[in-house]
Amino acid sequence: MSFLAEQTKAIDVGGGNVVTIRKITFGTRQRILAKHTKLDARTQDMSIDHAMMRFDQLRLNIVSWTGPDFDGFGVTDENIERLPVEIADQLLNAIDEFNTLSDEEKKV
């Protein structure tokens, strides 16, 4: 598979519900960081809005979802905001793991 081809992974979130996530791209990562990182020009202090950065990581990496709890609800910002915290956290952890190189991949 080409490293430029979109890579996806299905995540079982229980109850017959599955969310498909994508591997983040360099461009997406940089846009998220740029959007949520602020630099105070006077003090040179940097701040990061971690909460909204994590929301964007979730929002931009969910490809689709299926299952009884998602029936009738498309993948929209509003519906992502409505996810139960434990499901959002499970998906964020899966996204983090999916975007971390394994020891074998690091050797290549």
Image (spheres, grey):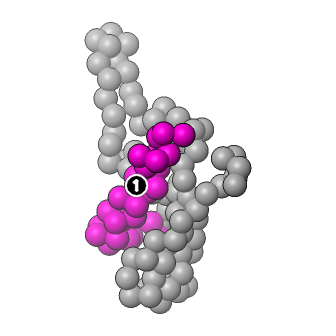
Which quadrant would residue 7 be assigned to in this image?
bottom right
Assign the N terminus to one quadrant of the image.
bottom right
Query: Which residue does the image show at 54% across and 49% down from the upper left?
Result: 24
Tell me which segment is drawn in magenta: 79-108
Is residue 55 one of those drawn in magenta?
Answer: no
The stretch drawn in magenta includes residue 89:
yes
- Residue at left 46%, top 71%? 11
Residue at position x 43%, y 77% in the image: 12
Q: Residue at x 48, y 39 (%)?
A: 107
For label 1, count other residues whose C-alpha is less than 10 Å away and answer few (under 14), some (14-19) or many (20+). few
Q: Nearer the viewer, residue 40 or 87?
A: 87
Q: Position of residue 52 (x, y in %)?
A: 38, 47
Q: Which residue is mark 1?
A: 97
In x, y percent, where is residue 14? 37, 82
Where residue 23 appears, as percent x and y from the top left, is 54, 53
Using residue 26 as the reference point, say whether residue 3 is left or right of it. right
Q: Quadrant of residue 93?
A: bottom left
Query: Which secondary structure dominates the residues rendered in magenta?
Result: helix
- Label 1: state its secondary structure: helix
